[in-house]
Image (cartoon, helix red, strand yellow):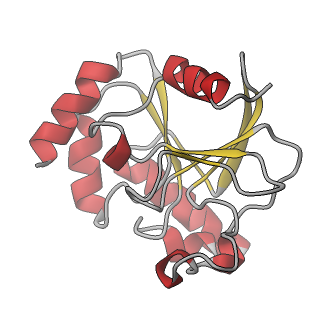
Amino acid sequence: MDAHLIEQWNATVGPDDTVYCIGDFCYMPGDTAIALAQMNGKKILICGNHDPMFKLMQGTQQQKEDAHGLALQCGFDDLHWQHTMRIEGIGQVKLSHFPYLPPKDAPEDQQRYLELRPKPTGENLLLHGHVHSYWQCQQDAGKPLMINVGIDVWGLRPVSEVALVSLFQKAGQP
C-alpha cells in the first residue's frame, strides 16, 4: 500500500511543489522518514492526532521544539499545529488537521478532540483532514466552508490548488 500511495503522490507532486500534509501522515517516525525520502516536493506537516509528534505539540514550548525537531528528522520541511495562507481565487485559508466544531447533533465519533478544533477567525475556507471519508466539502451554519483534503476522498492523491479553487467556487463561495 505504501508503494501505491508514494506512486500516486509522485504522479501528482513535482520536485519543486510545496505540499501541506494535513495530519495523520504516519504513526512511526522511521516509517515516515523512509516514505518521505521517496516523495517529491517540499512537505509541510500540519500535525494530526495519529502523527508521532502529536502529544509533544500539545505540551510545553520545549516539547513543541522537540516535535519540530522530530518532524525535520523524519523529512518534513516544517511543522505547524495550524497555518494560514492566501490562495488566489479563495483569499484567506486556514489549515488544520481538525474541522471546526461539529453541530451538537453530529454523530458521537465526530465529537472527539473538541478542545483542539480551530475556531473561525475571518478565513474564507478551512482545509482539514481527520474525518476520513465522511465528506469532501461541508459548511455548517455560521462557519466558513470546509474542504476535507484527506486522500480518502481524493483518489488517494494530494489535492491541487486548482482543484481547491474550483471546488470553492462551485460551492458558491465569493
Q: Nearer the viewer, residue 136 or 14?
A: 136
Q: Nearer the viewer, residue 160 or 65?
A: 160
Please say whether residue 136 is visible from this viewpoint.
Answer: yes
Does 113 sit left or right of 135 as displayed? right
Count up the numbered dots: 0
Please say whether residue 59 is visible from this viewpoint.
Answer: no
**Is the residue 82 above or below the residue 14 in the image?**
below
Taking the view exactly as shown, the residue that stands out farthest to the right is 122
Q: Name the spot of residue 41 as percent of width and height, x first.
A: 39, 25
Q: Name the spot of residue 122 as percent of width and height, x first.
A: 89, 44
Which image quadrant for residue 13?
A: top left
Residue at point 62%, 63% (across, down): 65
Q: Name the spot of residue 171 as percent of width and height, x first.
A: 64, 31
Residue at point 47%, 52% (across, down): 135
Which image quadrant for residue 11?
A: top left
Residue at point 79%, 53% (across, down): 143
